[in-house]
Image (cartoon, grey):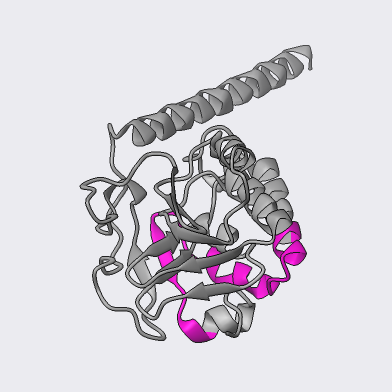
Amino acid sequence: MNRLRNWGAAGGIRLMLGLQVGIGAMLLVGDMLGAGIFTPRPTPAPSMEQPVRPGDQTRRFEPRTTPFQWPGSSTMPRRLQLETQGDRLHLLGQIAPGDAERFAAHLDGMEAPPRQLSLFSPGGSVADALDIGRRVRAEGMTTTVQDGNICLSACPYILAAGTSRSAGPEAMVGVHQHYFGENTLLPAFIAVEDIQRGQGELMQYLDEMGIDLRLMQPALMTPPHEIYVLVEEEMERYGLITPE
């Protein structure tokens, strides 16, 4: 009997060690993916250059190699660039951790906050996007995605913060699943608590901004390596753009 107990205890320890090794391996693979050592399996979704129509809205997505570039730039900036033109502030590039603080400092250094925020971003840090959005709403700014520009992944949450919101007919606004936590490439089952907490905070934010929470449905159904491009009727239905 004691031998059986000892074998059971040892088996439990071996099982726990095996799980820890497995999780460690997944962490390593996630870090390698982030460093570009490995690449994820290609998705059958069409490329982003392909026109979108209702019912055909899912496209392949890689923020670092998006074909959409700001005029005069050959690459997508790895963190937000802030450019002021009159009473309009342009946000360009990926949303990196710490960009919310940079955005706040930029506004604090202006004599008067800009009236409109123009967005051109493939997304990035959700937490920073929400903080930027709350500051945008507090300043009473409007938001827009101009024709030919993109607002993807975390970027639509900044769009949602405008007191009035618009997107040009040729603009691309899209959503997908997000990772929450320090390692943004971990499978969801490893970071369940972070995922659930993050989704809860995101839903609270959308509710604060007066956005229909049904926006979460296409987001949650689209994996991170794809993007679901919203058509105008959907953006109106969810309140992501407002009537003129």
- Residue 199 in sight in this render: no
Identify the residue at image location x=52%, y=86%. Answer: 233
Q: Nearer the viewer, residue 240 or 72?
A: 72
Q: Quadrant of residue 56?
A: bottom left
Residue 231 located within the stretch drawn in magenta: yes
Identify the residue at image location x=50%, y=29%. Answer: 22
Q: Quadrant of the N terminus?
A: top right
Q: Position of residue 117 (x, y in %)?
A: 53, 59
Q: Nearer the viewer, residue 204 or 75?
A: 75
Q: Position of residue 197 (x, y in %)?
A: 72, 47
Residue 120 located within the stretch drawn in magenta: no
Q: Is residue 112 above or below residue 32?
A: below
* Left-right relation of 65 to 115: left
Q: Position of residue 196 (x, y in %)?
A: 70, 50
Q: Quadrant of residue 28?
A: top left
Q: Is residue 189 above or below residue 55?
A: above
* Left-right relation of 194 to 75: right
Q: Is residue 89 above or below residue 45?
A: above
* Left-right relation of 108 to 167: right
Q: Magenta residues, as a range?
A: 204-233
Q: Nearer the viewer, residue 67 or 135?
A: 135
Q: Position of residue 218 (x, y in %)?
A: 54, 71
Number of marks: 0
Identify the residue at image location x=67%, y=42%. Answer: 194
Q: Is residue 220 above or below residue 27?
A: below
Q: Quadrant of the C terminus?
A: bottom right
- Residue 228 in sight in this render: yes
Q: Nearer the viewer, residue 205 or 61?
A: 205
